[in-house]
Amino acid sequence: MIRRIADNIYSPLGLTTADNYASVKQGRSRLCRYEGAMGLPNPFTASLFDWDQVERLDGYTRFETIAIQSARQALAQTTIDPASPRVLFVLSTTKGNVELLDAQAESFPEDRVHLGTAARMVSAYFGNPNQPLVVSNACISGLSAQIIAMRLIESGACDTAVVIGADVQSHFIISGFQSLMALSPMECRPFDIERVGLNLGEAAATIIYDKVDQIGADEWQAVSGAVRNDAHHISNPSRTGEGSYRAIRAAMGEMPAERLAFVNVHGTSTLYNDEMEAVAVNRAGLKDVPVNSLKGYYGHTMGAAGVLETILSMQAVDDGCILGTRGFEELGVSKAVRVSAQNAQTDKRAFLKLLSGFGGCNAAMLFEKGGER
Amino acid sequence: MEELVLELKKQIIEVLNLEDVQPEDIENDAPLFGSGLGLDSIDALELIVMMEKNYGIKIKDPSAGKEIFKSINSMAEFVQANRKK
Amino acid sequence: MTTKQWVKITPERVELNGEPLATTARGTALLTEIYRTRINDYPKFFKMDELCKLGFIASELLLQAEGDRHQDSEDRAVILFNRSSSVTNDRKYQDTIQRPDDYFPSPALFVYTLPNIVTGEIAIRNGYYGETSFYVLDAYDEATIRATVEASFLDGMTQSAICGWLDCEDADHFEASVYLIEK
């Protein structure tokens, strides 16, 4: 059984998991409007670090810094020796150090643009001898990384996996989403009838897994996971939620829907994504399970999203809480889904996490606390 | 107008990488999206960039593109009416 | 795991199951030549970036050799690895945003600034609903690739995979070493 040992969220809302959960439970966010930032001619709304407050590590890029800071805090909660060859670092990121492509970027060796090189800077910081595995599977990377980490532990390739999800925002990424007209000028509204697009965000989050024969009553288990493709379009989701539905079905297995406290969806607040997920959740027989999206607190944190949103969901279940979907008011999708703006109570111990991404990929992961009782 | 129509056809072929298409293959009134050239939403966004780059016309609302890019004729009419270059 | 077909592509040559294919072009023109002479039924090919073209050609050759596309299936995964991510196309996109006085970010280029898009293109072409994944390594490493692909079969549904190395450092330097394997 794959067990979570420790975690950390390092984000504009806080540098520890506890601080992040407390802020989110109180409905806070760092989403705000930026004009003329990063040399971008058009304004945008995003959740960004105040980089003057971040403890920059000398000789490390912004991306590498937040990945290391997050992993450092997670590892500090354990007795793991990160320099052990039986520990594997798995990094989830979409663009890593892409900002270094800009002629005006901070001065770093050109090779740092390569994700593998950046990842090695992170794993080597902790003295780990293995080549780190970088998962670059678009926006589902954070779940893809956890799923392959689970499988590598199960297959005996490693004993412990330090899964770090991280991305920083840049002129490159923001201008790209602006060219796709995918952004909302205001704070995003997941599943809402007035939603027009997503907000971008940046963060790092770390979750550490190992293997045990028995899961303790207070311990989290990564039960199962699946990645499936829509086979439809490289940037638009399938209207029938094909890949998402199949991923849910594969991850849920025999688990009855009633055992789920909630489904934490991707919920980016674009017209197409939220509609597609409503369709998929209904197809999968989960229409009576509470659904929430956390994008209203952090924006879309890309490579960090899958890890960050998993950790917050675990915190919420620990707290007997279903976090409200910030930004939601009135349902604006064609299928009924149980979305609420308010926090709610639960005594259930399992949840399903979903993500979808460019390239038509979709991921679903099932988590349960305390094992089967 | 004839010149503009031909110009638009050549630009579309180049900008959208329509390798096997010649200007003669594109009928002025035929729908560009759905059937015909089979253009998709990303192509529509590229055409919006093309409008600004080549004619100085900014299209802020992507749904407005549907009417403007319906056919070569509707594109040409729109450009003629709004061009700043 | 059993290897059913394998293909190797460099700017100079293409080898299918150890046999070189007769070609005259070199570099990315070689990819176009293979497309024209052996495929030629998928105009979307010309919208793809170099990494996607490379992966598309590699997968087409494998599937043609297999003789059965295994279309509309959920049990075939597409799992690819490289070192350069999508950097060749990233640089092209960067060029559209570098100069404030010539600022036209290209959506068609931006959608290809992710390495996993090639797995999506292969899935779309063949109706593959199974797992699609992309991993980036510091350097080609057979052991890591093997361990990751083997672990991926723990999915339970996956019975076969198009997998291997697919790297495009720039238009003149690319390499594909892709396999069709069965559990």
Image: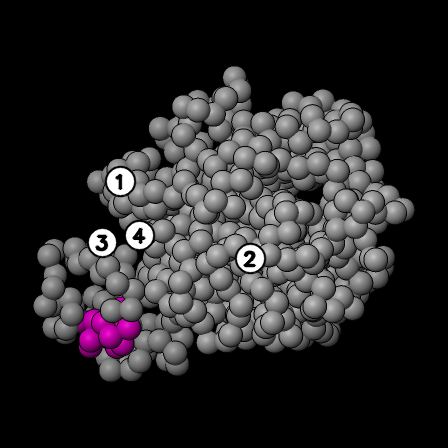
Residue B27 is a magenta residue: no
Mark on residue B53? 3
Residue A35 is tagged as 1
Instruction: Write down the region rendered in magenta.
Output: B65-76
Residue C93: give x, y in percent of width and height.
40, 46
Categorize mark 2 by other alpha carbons within 10 Å: few (<14), some (14-19), many (20+).
Answer: few
Same-chain check, marks 1 and 2: yes
Residue A59 placed where, x, y %? Answer: 53, 19
Q: CA distance from mark 3 to mark 2?
A: 50 Å
Mark-to-mark CA distance, 4 and 3: 23 Å
Q: Where does label 4 land, which residue?
A: A185
In the rendered structure, the answer to whether residue B45 lies left or right of residue C160 reads left
From the viewer's side, name the closer residue of C47 and A335: A335
Disc number lying in front (1 or 2):
2
Q: Secondary structure at mark 3?
A: helix
Residue C38 is labelled as: none
